Image (tube, helix red, strand yellow):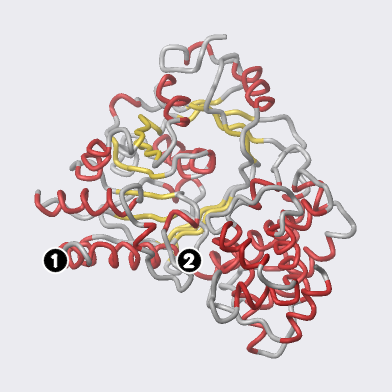
Amino acid sequence: MTRLSDQSLGRLAPGVTRFAYDRAAQAVGIVHFGIGAFHRAHQAWYTDLAMEAGAGTKHGRDWTIAGVSLRSAGVAEQMNPQDGLYSVTERSDAAPRARVVGSVRQVLVAPQDPAAVVALLAAPATKIASFTITEKGYGRAADGSLDPALAGEGSIYRYLAEGLAQRRAAKLPGLTLLSCDNLADNGGQLGRLLGEHVARIDADLARWIADECTFPGTMVDRIVPATTPEDVAVVEGLLGLSDAAAVVTEPFSQWVIEDRFAQGRPAWDQVGAQLVADVAPYETAKLRMLNGAHSALAYLGLGRGHVFVHEAVADPAIRPVIERLMQQEAAASLTPAPGQDLEAYAADLLARFANPSLHHRLVQIAMDGSQKIPQRWLETLAHHQRRGAESPAILTALAAWLRHLRGDNGPVDDPLSEPLQAATRSAAPGEWLDALFGAERLVSAIWTPTVSDRDFVARLL
């Protein structure tokens, strides 16, 4: 079948929506690191709609995206032969809806052409650098500081330092550096970590970045499973064209952004994004309720032989744990913004998790647990511990993660898999919490288990 591209757009099947703006007339205004399925279903999708809504205005022009893959050439091989075009298909109980997105112009593979990545960051038209590089992409040590061993040649810090140095030398304005990853205070963390890296190289550049660049906080929310060959075949039937970069997602999406930009932004607020003064209440609720529940579903569900989220949340042995985690433990640790209804949010999340049309694999969520659980579980545990309260649902999930580390669910995909598994092998199960969260702080310094915590978890191992 003919492949999706600029030339084949006229052959799209009826019922498929597509952008109407002139892509060729739009300059690249955004350089995005980590152009995986989530970015394509979320920020790039919003940007496509924003350029459409703001066509002909200053907010609607020159915001196309140059994607950067930090490691693999896979996404570039999918998208570049398609002129950067791809489709987003929303699945629910209703008939699937597909849209061809035009906001991505090209994808660079950073190790193959690092100079081109730096040149894009330094280009006068570029105004925003954004990131979906997952928690481990920030190169943090267990105490939250920058781990120099993780901030080397292949990291974002190398490209940002060089690109921003060239902007300063050319007397160009700074950039908005927009983290869209699941980190508490993601903008603040990016600014602090980049500052640590640059200060070791060039103190004057570090001061220029602090003065000229902004690091808005964001909260991003959309469930985006990894695309399967079966998904690609279904999308081909919808489009009438082959799409190697197809993305399948849910109808729901949310993007909350701190309104702090160095050089303007697309008209994201005209297409559903919320521009606010303080992202923290939304970000923390999402991390502790949605992401916290997702991780619990992953480890508990894999332990009971499930493959997908909708299977795990329907399991009567798991669902009460998830309900308690969200409604009684995570929600109780939060201070909501005015009008933020956490009870309704929890109910909506349970309904989204139960969507049988969205085959979200538990093993995908279970990856990189050591990088995720501090903000998803440990912040809540620490909150209740300070108040003398217990968190049995999160402790139950934590025990499931420890069983996962033990190898109960197969190979462990985690950047700390070797030291984590070595720690569990060298200690009796009743001592595992101390090995990971005790004196050595292998995972995080946020929370220290009590005797009661250790006893509770040990009973489940």
Sequence-wise first label, 1 or 2: 1
Q: Give the label, 1 or 2, closer to the camera.
A: 1
Crowd tier of the residue under label 1, counting other residues whose Cα lies within 10 Å: few below 14, some 14–19, many 20 or above: few
**Farthest residue, direction front:** 426
Instruction: Work out whether 81 lies above or below 147.
Output: above
Q: Position of residue 145 (x, y in %)?
A: 39, 70
* Quarter placement of the N terminus: top right
Q: Position of residue 394 (x, y in %)?
A: 72, 70
Mark 2 and mark 1 in contact (Cβ < 8 Å)? no
Crowd tier of the residue under label 2, counting other residues whose Cα lies within 10 Å: few below 14, some 14–19, many 20 or above: many
Q: Position of residue 58 (x, y in %)?
A: 28, 42
Task: Write down the residue under mark 2.
Answer: 279
**C-alpha span from label 1 to label 2:** 30 Å
Which residue is rendered at x = 27% and y = 52% of the image?
Answer: 160
Q: Going by the image, does 144 lie left or right of 286?
A: left
Q: Amino acid at mark 1?
A: Asp
The answer to whether any part of residue 330 appears in the image is no
Which residue is rendered at x = 79% and y = 78% of the image?
Answer: 456
Which residue is rendered at x = 23% and y = 54% of the image?
Answer: 161
Considering depth in this image, is 212 or 259 the residue closer to the camera?
Answer: 212
Q: Quadrant of residue 258?
A: bottom left
Q: Position of residue 240 (x, y in %)?
A: 60, 14
Q: Going by the image, does 347 lie left or right of 273?
A: right
Considering depth in this image, is 316 or 351 the residue closer to the camera?
Answer: 316
Task: Write down the residue under mark 1.
Answer: 204
